Image (spheres, helix red, strand yellow):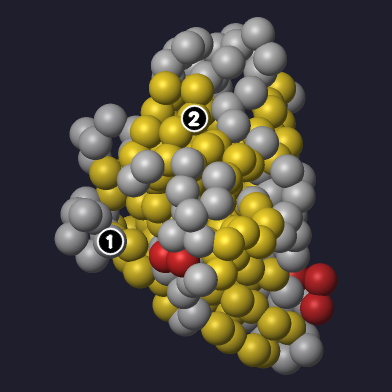
Amino acid sequence: GAVVSQHPSRVICKSGTSVKIECRSLDFQATTMFWYRQFPKQSLMLMATSNEGSKATYEQGVEKDKFLINHASLTLSTLTVTSAHPEDSSFYICSAALAGGGGELFFGEGSRLTVL
Amino acid sequence: GNSVTQMEGPVTLSEEAFLTINCTYTATGYPSLFWYVQYPGEGLQLLLKATKADDKGSNKGFEATYRKETTSFHLEKGSVQVSDSAVYFCALSARGGSNYKLTFGKGTLLTVNP
């Protein structure tokens, strides 16, 4: 089946620094990718929808200047957490929709961000 | 808005036991319903889905029936195996919107002991 890979799987950074997380579709082209955030014992919350070659669409309450999303190619989307603070510590998950694939989503393994 | 409520975990069962994980939803219109599974160290995978009332989704011995009258989509399996240990997420996507935009429940951790 289709594979989505996230990198890094774990990252620890100091407060005030920026962190980039990559989401790659390894064996298919993804016109649309999604970024989610998951707090402990909470639901996956959709943060933004990323479309190749255009600006991301952010969900209400998500700061677009804080969480920069770039989807420069059909196989790569990146999420950059700018000026990270401890409250940004979370599990970030991406998913990708197979172009013409009828709506099925393929998920990455997730990236655990810890901000000290 | 749309929401999904699933039973709190963790759930611990012995091998060959019967499994039920409850899921109810709130949505406008008639959503599509999904169960996703996340095995340790892996990404979420679609387990099964149902797109209209009374549909039954099934896969790998798991089943769930779309019940419009009770707004439910409970996951069941007659005889669980150790390899079923994972986190299970109930989700919906609202009809009429993007078929991809999912609302998830909190997830239920299932542990099956030999």
Chain letter of mark 1 equals A
Q: Is residue A89 left or right of residue A55?
A: right
Q: Residue at x 27, y 44 (%)?
A: A98
Q: x, y (%) of residue B15?
A: 51, 61
Q: Would you place residue B93 above or below residue B52 in this image?
A: below
**Residue identified by numbered label 2:** B64
Please give the name of the residue rendered at 23% of the width and 65% of the height, measured from the top-left corner.
A26
- Kind of residue indicated by mark 2: Ala
Q: Residue at x 61, y 59 (%)?
A: B13
Q: Answer yes or no: is residue A51 visible.
A: no
Residue A27 visible? The answer is yes
State which chain disc 2 sits on. Answer: B
Q: Secondary structure at mark 1?
A: loop
The residue under the point 70% across, 40% down is B6
Could you say where residue A12 lies in the image, as x and y percent from the top left? 64, 89
Give above or below for B99 relative to A98: above
Q: Quadrant of residue A11?
A: bottom right
Of marks 2 and 1, the one in the foreground: 2
**Residue hosting label 1:** A3
